[in-house]
Amino acid sequence: MPSSNQASDQEIELLRLVTVGSVDDGKSTLIGRLLYDTKGAFEDQLQAVRKDDGADDGADSIDLAQLTDGLAAEREQGITIDVAYRYFSTPKRKFIMADCPGHEQYTRNMVTGASTANAAVILIDARKGVLQQTRRHTHIIGLLGLPHLIVAINKMDLIDYDEATFTRIKEELSEFCARQHIHDLICIPISALAGDMVVDRGDNMPWYSGQTVLEALEGVEVSGHIDECDFRFPVQYVCRPQTKELPDFRGFMGRIASGTVKAGDEIMQLPAGKKSKVKEIVTFDGDLDEAFAPQSVTLTLEDEIDISRGDIIVHADKAPQIAKEIDAIVCWMGEEPLTPRKKYLIKHATNTVKAMVSEIQYRTDINALTQDENAEELTVNEIGKISLKLMSPLTFDHYADNRATGNFIIIDSFTNNTVGAAMIC
Amino acid sequence: MSQHKLTQLQELESESIHIMREVVAEFRNPVMLYSVGKDSSVMLHLARKAFHPGPLPFSLLHVDTGYKFKEMYEFRDWYVKEVGAKLIVHRNEDAIAKGMNPQEFGVARCCGALKTGALLEALEIGGYDAAFGGARRDEERSRAKERVFSMRDSFGQWDPKNQRPELWSLYNGRIHDGESVRVFPISNWTEMDVWQYIREESIPIVPLYYAKERLMVERGNHLIPAEEGQFLLEGEEPKMVMSRYRTLGCMPCTGAVRSSATTIEGIIEEASIATRSERETRIIDHGSNSMEDKKKEGYF
């Protein structure tokens, strides 16, 4: 390894996070600040968004919000429409940040950004406190099962850095989060504009002794403990080279969705339930004795059993559920509403099956957080619980038990568009 | 306590392999765009890992403008043979015969004919329904919102307002006849990740990335190679400059940077303190919106 003051790559972990808030909350300014202060944005990219007052005095002369709006359509309208992915790193971690618009009409984008994240940063305007939109954002983070929530209470500079206001907002949020099953909540008073408590502490809040936003991001657990769940291996592709060197090789390729596997383990293929033992765990860099989520590997088995794409390999004594009728919480993303008796395709892990909506159990009023049990449809950006009948049995876990095998997407078989995101419950 | 931790590079590698396997499993006729640069070297390496011990289940496609550096052609032919891949080279012979060049026709028209035009032509001739590309979201701001599976209509065009949401690690690869997808397996990699991975995995790259004394002219803020056949402006005096390329494109439109990095460690050291993005040396990106417009027309 070369001499370098950075931690070696061996120690650098990856944290995927989602940031949610509206333009008014100063979210773009916060992200711009993180990128600027961790040098996640380059000089020529900054120049393109530098304000035209000629002076170059660091972050102050840059329209930080402009750094993050990628498409011309967005810059024209001054809003963020789509999920944008940002990258920055510190000597400890690399961060992949899904930057989502906060407005209600973009709930689907927030769900998309949150689906791959292990931590969320939500913005609150300190002058306004906990609003309906804060409750909506928090509820969605809870639904998607993100283990960590960081709430940045922004614009502290506009309320004279008042500790009492911060404490009041924090208490109100803590109570609400507990009801949403979010247990790891970190509240931080910040001024994104002035830079207080984002990367640097600043001098304005000596009363606050907690973490800065960046310290919190460097501190949360990254893995989501996916390797501690039961072993699930959705088969992506069957490798049969049939070459002179490998005439009989038959390997099952996939990425371990959860858990760990060892050579010699007794396994079962689902849904048919045929059993065998793991012979080898093959990789380009040599065979492994043990592999874990989220590694991509190739498994060979002791016995010639019939396995194809869409099947899931599990430990014989830790079987998931198999059913042709399932319930799920759905975030609807299609322009055409979801209605009972409509037929769709669902893609779950590596398996695609036909499905029919048998019932809408309820629609959640995403602002009041009440449930309407008489709902007849789910329109775009709405969330509700539905029941589905499937053409063939699905092998799955409940989302609450296993984020990796508890989710699926809904595809409109006519337009081929992705129209829904679902979590099995 | 769990001992099961991947480094961030291992996690990125696993994600990229997962994406490549999804494409091969779900598409009829995929192809991998191969541009000879460092990102292509990483893509090819990842593909070999993804399908080991089997052979690569797709061909490589090089869209050649005829304006690439000599070292790039040499490297391409050597490396492709070395790893046993099948290479298809496609050129817009029509435009090349008519003498298309960026000086007379402008950068936009030249790229439009020799890159975008040739690419769309090659994809149509091959009948490919999926094409892997090495674009990364950190490169350019219109790419920050690109999907891993980027839907293209039957004209190869990108509509930024009509892209499918991508949730968890589920990619929707269903398309109608005539449509295709561009797939970006290294979307989540940064320039630094690419260089570190090249070091960790000892991946071969074109020698142009390493610094040496090269004949250059200074044009504005750019160092332009003064190689044979290069178009020089009046009054430009070529001189030897210790320099290297951060990205590789066509010779007339790719600038070099002053550098003394003769090893991969040196390059990583430079990348870690770089204050300007790597695409700054790519003339095609300059001008407002140019990448977004080019993508809409069918470019990567």
Image: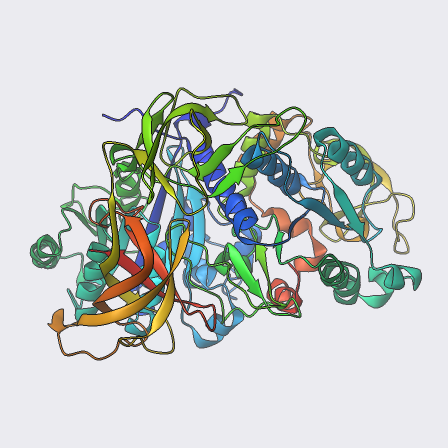
Question: Viewer-proximal residue, A23 or A71?
Answer: A71
Answer with left or right where residue A39 lies relative to residue B111: left
Q: Position of residue A67 (x, y in %)?
A: 47, 59
Q: Is residue B33 above or below residue B239?
A: below
Question: Viewer-proximal residue, A201 or B87?
Answer: B87
Q: Position of residue B104 (x, y in %)?
A: 87, 65
Answer with left or right where residue B142 lies relative to residue A350: right
Q: Position of residue B176 (x, y in %)?
A: 56, 68
Q: Position of residue A293 (x, y in %)?
A: 35, 35
Q: Is residue A42 above or below residue B121?
A: above
The answer to whether residue A405 is seen in the rendering is yes
Q: Is residue B277 above or below residue A337?
A: above
Q: Quadrant of the C terminus of chain A?
A: bottom left
Q: Residue at x 38, y 56 (%)?
A: B167
Q: Residue at x 34, y 27 (%)?
A: A261
The answer to whether residue A195 is seen in the rendering is no
